Image (cartoon, coloured by chain):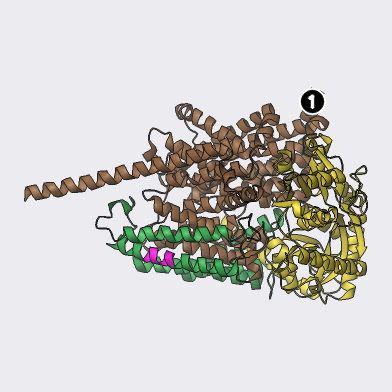
Chain colours: A green, B brown, C yellow
Amino acid sequence: MASRRSDIILSTILLLVSALWCWGVVTTIPGAEDGSRLGARGFPLGLGLLLGGLSLIILLQSFRPTPADTIDGEAPPDISRGAELWAVAATVGLLVGYAALLEYTGFMIATALVVAAAVGPVLGIWRPRLILGMSIGLSLGIYLIFGKLLGVYLPYGKLINLAF
Amino acid sequence: MDAFASALGAVSDPFTLLAIVTGAIIGIVFGSVPGLTYSMALALVLPITFKFDTSAAVGMLLGTYIGGMTGGSVSAILLGIPGTPSAAATVLDGYKMTRNGRAGLALGGAVLASGFGGVFSLLVMIVSVDLVARLAIQFGPVEIFALVLFGLSTICGLAGKSLVRGMIAGVIGLLLMTIGLDDMDGVARMTFGWTPLLQGVDLLVAMVGLFAVPQIMKTLIDYKLDRAFRLNASGVRSELPTFRQLRNSFWLMFRCSALGTAVGSIPGTGGPIAAFLAYDHAKRFSKEPQRFGKGKLDGVMAPESANNAVTGGAMIPLLSLGIPGDPATAVMLGGFLIHGLVPGPMLFTTNKPEVYLIYLAIFVAYVTVVVFQYFGIRGFVKLLKVPPHLMAVGILIMCGVGTFAIRNSFLDVYMMVGVGLIGYLLMRARIPITPIILGLVLGPTLEREFRTAVIMSEGSFGVFFSSTTAVIFYALTIGVIGFHFYGQMRDAKKTRDAANSKKAQQQGAN
Amino acid sequence: MTKMTLKSVLLGATASVFLLAGLNVQARAEFPEKPVEMTVLFGGTAQTIGQLLADLMSKNMANSVVAVSRTGGGGAVGYSHVQSTPADGYNMVWNSNSVSTSHYRGNMKFNYEAFTPIARVSVETPALAVSADSGWKSLEDMAKAVKAGDSKLKVGISGNGSFTHLTSAALFDKMGIADKVVYVPYGKGKAPVELLAKRVDAAVQWPGQFIPHQQAGKLSILCVTGKDRIPQLKDTPSCAEAGATDLNITMWRGLAAPAGTPADVVAKLQDAAKAAIASDEFQSAADKIGFEASFLPADEFGSLIASDDAAISELMGKLGLKK
């Protein structure tokens, strides 16, 4: 059963996270400064333990013979693994690339480049007019409406700049 | 009455009217774009109002606040991404309605409910500002803690079939919010000595990550597999709920508005908690709870009437005590002060005309919002005509710009991506996303009030049972969870019985 | 057809943006050639004043000053950002005593010496308030009652290690009741409500939060913590007058740039700040919001920061808050 396997993986990871979290809390957060207070440590520690306990329940449930009540009503989406991996990688890649470009080349260049990259190489729509129109339209449009008209502070680049 | 006449004169001044309308429209824009929010809109509008006279300045600030609160529903319904935290509950049924081709009705219902909730809370404020303020200050740390705990119990209703999974989601949300500088003791938590992380996880950043990033991923998957969801947008009109639907929902909106006003008047709680409580309430008392989450209009109207009722509620402590309930009202307080309006108990005796002015401006702002959004529905649904994969590119850009603009921090953009990726993986492991938001929203309040209560009682935990109000909230919380568990056990037994009898039948047949 | 024209307009517009950017590069002449960023560390009134100041400073300079909010971490995030920017005058921070408290609390590795002072802009004086029903009319009344009673005095402050915490600790130390006080941290301006609801016995906060309630007869402001009275509360004694001998604690806000910013650039920013502070708009805002507009030139501001830093260090050490 796929859902059982995914439950075991999920609960193991969460148990690990909770253990690491609690270790981090105990070693880096000072406890209460005097007895009458809960201090900064109590809450994160309690929550970390709670997460561990809850993941343990999931782990135990996944070993039960009839896990009828652990299976959610929704059927898992039928997604081909390849398409999913591609979509996740593309989204994360574009967003991380955008963040890095924003920091170094400023809003204008970053937006134009990322939109062009998204439409062309990523989506595979090689229509020059669409690529050009969308990258210039979005960067200039956001610049004019949000940056100029509404006064949102758009990032300046550390290396190069075009107005923004 | 002279005061009222002069306020009426001030509001009907064309420039003031223009300021309110402009503010409302700016608010709607910021509210409806994921990643931008009304707190930011208010901070941007504030310097402009320095140069205005009092009535225009107050009008513009109020218009922005109200427009922003209402605008959040637009992207929640159309894109499945809430524009503001208060609209997170609206996604549940609103986005399903869009997928069912009822985007126009959902938007229409949301606008009407918003207007209803807003005007309801305005009336409550006018009639009983003193009384409500006096009741609200009775909510101390213990009572607020109990209320927030009750708010967390709505996870039950949102968790789907497995309460444990819902609770895991809630705990993850609570955990995320403890990262960064602890305001109370001034110590760093889980930053491992890295200064930029002291800023912690911003609620809005996490929200954009949790809703928008998985949505972009799903759109790309659909595009790759060439089964994109297409909607015939030309057929979507600005449809208002029918008279019968309204009559059926009237008492629901009324109750949710009352709930929103009450929650709003308690400083430090605010919109999201009201919206989730309202959604839970609507589902719990509905004749057909199983249809919630599948595109039921009540699931949109309940949270929308509640979160807009919060606006009037939040004005009560702001005006009568000078206490801002959230960052947005704190900005407004600054704007009021610059124009010599000092909120506090004296405001109602010394500044009568300005108080009436505030009431009237709120009313005008709501009229603007309802009219603008109603006639805007046609334009909004045109967004659905944009092919989803191209829309995803636009959303991706706005997520980057928006999360950066909140605190002008690049770290926030990376954080949004990280939280989004985690959110997607959790979703694939069948952990529901909405309870994470609930944990994020309620976490800081829950912890702060708990610790404050312990400090005030000098370390005695008995203090948590010293207040009747608090005990009532605990009882409600236990009731909700117990009821849910009972239901779950019954369902599980049914499934097992069915399985057993099927087995028996098969054996019999053999 | 229309599509084509639209596209050509867009292309033309982009081309002109490129052109303008090019011109900007060529026209390098005098500071400032581009907008100056003023990092704002906190929301609320600090942000309101910061934005107003940026607005007014822009009027006196060739390019505008933009208030950019970088909140979080009790100011540490914004200080770290500005400290890491080039020392060319295009980045400054709207700072306050938080530069010292953040450092000694262990949240910031560098201290005030990482910045070059530009000008002090304003001074705010915390005030001590109690519920009107307590019957305490003066600081002495309160101290006497606390000394005589068995229970501890609950005092609302903004957070442990915050400026209001340090102020209260110094004040109660002078009154000899330091060991009979419990500090309740609130943050976000909630202390007055708690005081109104009588869940705390006293609160130390900014006077603006108390004045309306004093006028309504619900709260009494016992004293202000500076050595002089403040204009908004002419009838309220300073704590030093009321019995806390020599107590003098005020919080300043001002502007600072990364250390090493050229002196001529600092001078230009200082003059712009001076003109902004002297303007009627700033003075009236100060009156209404409840702070004192008080300019101090760069060198004097620098020695003030240093002496306050030493005092805060000593106080935090005494309270065991130093990391």
Image quadrant in which you'd find residue A110: bottom right
Answer yes or no: is residue A164 visible: no
Relative to B395, residue B359 above or below: above
Q: Which residue is mark 1?
A: B5
**Picture coordinates of residue C136 (x, y %)?**
83, 40
Is residue C292 or residue B427 the one in the foreground? C292
Which corner quadrant holds the N terminus of chain B? top right
- Please count the marks in the image: 1
Badge 1 marks a residue whose secondary structure is: helix
The residue at the point 81 percent across, 73 percent down is C113
Is residue A6 or residue A106 the one in the foreground? A6
Image quadrant in which you'd find residue B53: top right
Image quadrant in which you'd find residue B347: top right
Q: Which residues are magenta?
A: A9-15
Horizontal side, residue C157 vs residue C310: left or right: left
The residue at the point 48 percent across, 71 percent down is A121
Residue A10 included in the magenta stretch of the image: yes
State which chain disc 1 sits on.
B
The residue at the point 55 percent across, 62 percent down is B416
**Picture coordinates of residue A95 (x, y %)?**
54, 67
**Picture coordinates of residue B460 (x, y %)?**
60, 48
